[in-house]
């Protein structure tokens, strides 16, 4: 089930992405005028998703907390920096979170290098669109799963985190990442394939 925090809470069931985007823009306009309730509404709407995104991307609670705090500090200090012509408010906030998290990860460790040629060979060895995450029902495997997700290249990790862990649609993920749904689908397919290979090597997927 999709987290209610992605839609303006359970307070507005059935809210469409377009309606949510318009509401976000109005809240941001009010925030730029110093309206504190508008900030509170945006914070309550996106604090949870942004924190979880940063946690899945970095694997570090402190980084997730710092990222979330910095995102909203930037929002307070530069509410007028948002350009509606470049995407949604949600995409704007997640863009800030992506940049902050990426810098934190790069400062703490190097991204794992992957052999692209090997990935091309293995891409079509995955049987169908097997979602490896559904096979990991044992709580003891969660640490292994997190480690495998953290080992994915940035673009694939984002797709897996948003679509498989946060359960967003391709369209919603595309709007947040500023790309097409087709690109999201391609990245997700590749990310799942890499995950399956990593977990299979560790005998987590049989």
Image (cartoon, rainbow, N blue to C red):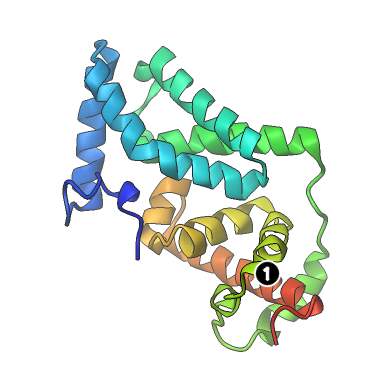
Horizontal relation, residue 38 to residue 80: left or right: left
Residue 184 location, x and y as percent? Answer: 49, 61
Find numbered disc 1 in the image and state the secondary structure of the residue it sits on. Answer: helix
Residue 61 location, x and y as percent? Answer: 62, 39
Q: Closer to the camera, 155 or 47?
A: 47
Q: Residue at x 59, y 45 (%)?
A: 55
Q: Closer to the camera, 84 or 52?
A: 52
Q: Residue at x 77, y 81 (%)?
A: 203
Tell me how many marks there are.
1
Dividing the image into 4 quarters, which one contains the N terminus? bottom left
Q: Residue at x 43, y 45 (%)?
A: 49
Look at the picture and state if 127 lies above or below 162. below
Q: Is residue 144 visible?
A: yes
Label 1: how many Cα within 10 Å (few below 14, some 14–19, many 20+): few
Look at the picture and state if 114 lies above or below 88. below
Tag 1 residue: 141
Q: Closer to the camera, 24 or 85?
A: 24
Look at the picture and state if 167 lies above or below 57. below
Dividing the image into 4 quarters, which one contains the C terminus? bottom right
Q: Is residue 87 visible?
A: no
Q: Residue at x 64, y 64 (%)?
A: 142
Residue 26 location, x and y as percent? Answer: 20, 28
């Amino acid at each position: 089930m999709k987290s209610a925090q992605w839609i303006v809470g359970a307070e507005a069931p059935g809210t469409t992405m377009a309606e949510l985007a318009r509401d976000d823009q109005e809240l941001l306009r009010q925030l730029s005028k110093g309206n504190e309730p508008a900030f509170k509404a945006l914070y309550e709407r996106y604090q949870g998703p942004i924190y979880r995104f940063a946690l899945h991307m970095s694997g570090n609670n402190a980084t997730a907390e710092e990222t979330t705090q910095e995102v909203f500090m930037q929002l307070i200090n530069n509410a007028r920096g948002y350009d509606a012509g470049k995407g949604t408010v949600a995409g704007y906030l997640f863009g800030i979170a992506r940049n902050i998290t990426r810098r934190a990860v790069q400062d703490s460790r190097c991204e794992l290098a992957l052999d692209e040629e090997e990935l091309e060979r293995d891409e079509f060895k995955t049987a169908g669109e097997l979602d490896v995450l559904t096979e990991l029902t044992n709580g003891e495997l969660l640490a292994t799963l997190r480690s495998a997700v953290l080992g994915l290249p940035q673009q694939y990790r984002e797709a897996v985190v948003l679509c498989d862990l946060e359960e967003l649609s391709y369209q919603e993920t595309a709007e947040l990442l500023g790309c097409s749904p087709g690109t999201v689908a391609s990245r997700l397919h590749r990310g799942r394939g890499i995950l399956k290979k990593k977990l299979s090597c560790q005998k987590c997927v049989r």
